[in-house]
Image (spheres, rainbow, N blue to C red):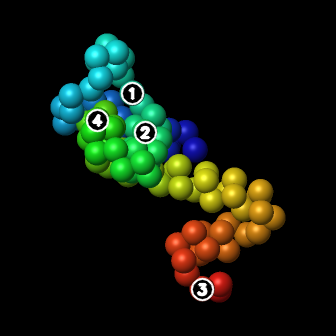
């Protein structure tokens, strides 16, 4: 687990240096965002079809870090729904994607 965290820190640190510049909101210019904030904003903006926020969140971290954050968010959401529905994570994931039950 420690190796994963160390690797993730390296990715996030390197990503901030080479992150694409999106025009962040005025209050966001002075603070850095982590990959989980970027993922949460990106996914919620995608659901709301808010292209400006999608672009903004995409500029906070590298595409690789954003992809990791979105994947982690998906995993956590499936686990939470599975617990709430008392179903397996696989059943929930297949239902969300419109796939037939396994």
Question: Is the C-beta separation of discs 1 and 4 under 8 Å?
Answer: no
Give the labeled residue for mark 2: 41
**3 or 1: mark nearer the eye:** 3
* The one of 2 and 12 positioned closer to us in this rendering: 12
Q: Which mark is residue 100?
A: 3
Q: Residues within 10 Å of mark 3 (few under 14, many from 20)?
A: few
The residue lying at 40 percent from left, 44 percent from top is 45
Labels 2 and 4: the sequence-earlier one: 2
Relative horizontal placement of residue 3, taking residue 78 as reference (left or right)? left
Question: Is the C-beta separation of discs 2 and 4 under 8 Å?
Answer: yes
Q: Which mark is residue 91?
A: none
Q: Looking at the image, is 78 positioned above or below residue 61? A: below
Labels 2 and 3: the sequence-earlier one: 2
Q: Looking at the image, is 32 positioned above or below residue 20? A: above
Give the labeled residue for mark 1: 33
Q: CA distance from mark 2 to mark 3?
A: 30 Å
Question: Is the C-beta separation of discs 2 and 3 under 8 Å?
Answer: no
The residue lying at 29 percent from left, 23 percent from top is 25
Q: CA distance from mark 2 to mark 4?
A: 9 Å
Q: Mark 4: which secondary structure?
A: helix
Question: Is the C-beta separation of discs 3 and 1 under 8 Å?
Answer: no
Labels 1 and 2: the sequence-earlier one: 1
Relative horizontal placement of residue 84, taking residue 6 as reference (left or right)? right
Labels 4 and 3: the sequence-earlier one: 4
Q: Mark 1: which secondary structure?
A: loop
Query: Could you tell me residue 51's position as x and y percent?
Result: 28, 45
Give the labeled residue for mark 4: 56
Q: CA distance from mark 4 to mark 3?
A: 36 Å
Question: Can you tell which quarter of the image residue 10 is in?
Answer: top left
């Amino acid at each position: 687990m420690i190796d994963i965290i160390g690797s993730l820190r390296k990715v996030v640190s390197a990503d901030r240096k080479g992150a694409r510049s999106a025009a962040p909101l005025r209050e966001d210019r002075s603070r850095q965002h982590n990959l989980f904030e970027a993922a949460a904003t990106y996914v919620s903006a995608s659901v709301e079809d808010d292209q400006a926020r999608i672009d903004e969140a995409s500029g906070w971290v590298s595409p690789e870090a954003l992809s990791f954050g979105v994947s982690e968010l998906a995993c956590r959401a499936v686990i939470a729904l599975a617990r709430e529905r008392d179903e397996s994570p696989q059943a929930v994931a297949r239902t969300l994607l419109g796939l037939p039950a396994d």
